[in-house]
Image (cartoon, rainbow, N blue to C red):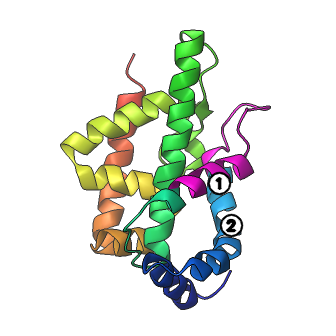
Amino acid sequence: MTAPANLTQLLVSWSNGDPNALDDLTPLVHQELRRVAARCMAGERPGHILQPTALVNEAFLRLIDWKDVRWQNRAHFFAVAAQMMRRVLVDLARTRDREKRGGGQLHVSLSEAADIAAGPGVDLVALDDALRTLETLNARQSRVIELRFFGGLSLDEAAHVLDVSVATVRRDWSLAQAWLYRELNRA
């Protein structure tokens, strides 16, 4: 991938309405977005209707439809992209749950998320509901989970996006993991 400064420059140019910047940006971010999508889908069942490339395409289409976004840097872009991927997966899971009345739920393995929780997969709708609840209790902790789990951002990158210290992100990460584990394992 290109240097973060060059990527940031392209993001800023795109924000300023330069259509050529989007053309130059797309191949640079596609591989990283695909890695994030693959991570988001790591715990999905085999033969899932949506593959990582399709998830990237859907999220990217939603991203380019956003108007008046002022991209700050690479981490900001990938944080928003991760949020879009989460929305795509949750929308698909909710639609599927409505159609099947509880059957065939999408599953994401939290063990793939660098220590969020141990044990079997958690359904994506339950994870999204838990994150929404956590957001009402502590919005920053919810955002840390989203950035780290869905976005694959490092502690440093998440701290930069949230404009807080790495120690704060590390603390929020630990507390949110424990809260989510308890919340998702309630009977």
What is the residue that sits farthest to the right in this orientation? Answer: 47
List the residue tagged with mark 1: 56
Query: Foreground: 11 or 41?
Result: 11
Residue 107's label in the rendered image is: none
Which residue is pictured at 70% across the width and 38% down the height?
Answer: 50
Provide residue 102's location: percent of width, then percent of height: 54, 12
| Residue 8 shows in this picture | yes
Residue 170 in magenta?
Answer: no
Provide residue 32's location: percent of width, then percent of height: 65, 67
Which residue is pictured at 44% across the width and 34% down the height?
Answer: 127
- Magenta span: 40-62
The reply, left or right, for residue 16 in relation to residue 28 is: left
List the residue tagged with mark 2: 30
Which residue is pictured at 33% across the width and 49% down the height?
Answer: 142
The amino acid pointed to by label 1 is Val
Q: What is the quadrant of the C terminus in the image?
A: top left
Mark 2 crowd level (few <14, some 14–19, many ≥20, 10 Å Cα): some
The reply, left or right, for residue 8 in relation to residue 141 is: right
What is the residue that sits farthest to the top in this orientation? Answer: 101
Residue 132, quarter of the rendered image: top left
The amino acid pointed to by label 2 is His
Q: Are marks 2 and 1 in contact (CB under 8 Å)?
A: yes
Residue 50 in magenta?
Answer: yes
